[in-house]
Image: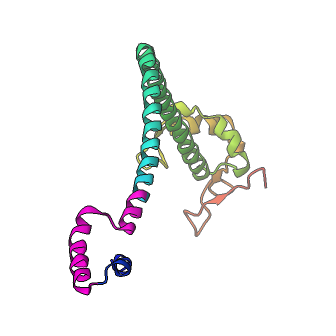
Amino acid sequence: MDWLEEILKKYVTDEAKLKEFTEEVNKTFPLNAVPKKQYNDKVTELNYKTVELETASEKIKETTETLAGFATLEVESKEGKDKIAALEKDLTEYKDGESTRIAGVESAFQKQGALDRALRLAKANPEALDFLSEQFKMDDLTLGDDKKSFVAGFDSQIEAIKTAKPSFFLAEKIGESGTPPAGNPVEKESTKPYWK
């Protein structure tokens, strides 16, 4: 409050009266006036609050309009709920169908892999694997737990195919005369397949 004291010095010549007046102003001024910095801070805060209030008013207006739209939708909500329920049912059916289809494809790949291994073990011509695979009734083949071998259906089908198409398999025979050669009673020799 130095500024007020400087003004008063121009008009009051008695130092005692000036000091007494200044002390009284210093006591009562804060109770009756707001300092400029505090006032400016409050004005700035008020401006921010005004902007926030305008924004909130806009949002309230938008929300009111949206709620009015929902009132219209409420009438249509029964139809909407029915459509959603139908779509959810369709989605569930589609997922179930796709899961079944994917399981079928996985099973077919596993069966094909097991069939290729089994045909190689049965000494099938490697170049004829595709043709021989087509001769099998895949639905009649049952995979084992390891998904790499068959527990049913393969033996009967492979024997029928070997009988019908023996040239597609490597044949084994004992010696040229059908008896084991001397000095080597159990040695087997294989015949050369037609494709070599």
In the drawing, does residue 80 fall left or right of residue 27? right
Q: Is residue 191 magenta?
A: no
Q: In the image, is residue 87 above or below residue 6?
A: above
Query: Residue at left 46%, top 43%?
Result: 55
Query: Residue at left 22%, top 85%?
Result: 16
Residue 188 at what x, y percent from top left? 60, 60
In the drawing, does residue 76 fall left or right of residue 1? right
Query: Residue at left 47%, top 26%?
Result: 65
Dividing the picture into quarters, in which one does residue 39 lie? bottom left
Query: Residue at left 56%, top 35%?
Result: 157
Residue 125 at what x, y percent from top left? 70, 49
Please identify the quadrant where the N terminus is shown: bottom left
Relative depth, front residue between 18 and 2: 18
Tell how many labels: 0
Q: Is residue 28 magenta?
A: yes
- Residue at the farthest bottom position: 15
Please identify the quadrant where the C terminus is shown: bottom right
In the rendered image, is residue 84 in sight?
no
Relative depth, front residue between 183 and 123: 123
Most prominent secondary structure in the magenta stretch? helix
Residue extent of the magenta highlight: 14-43
Residue 132 at what x, y percent from top left? 67, 40
In the drawing, does residue 196 fall left or right of residue 42? right
In the rendered image, is residue 53 in sight?
yes
Residue 40 at what x, y percent from top left? 42, 63
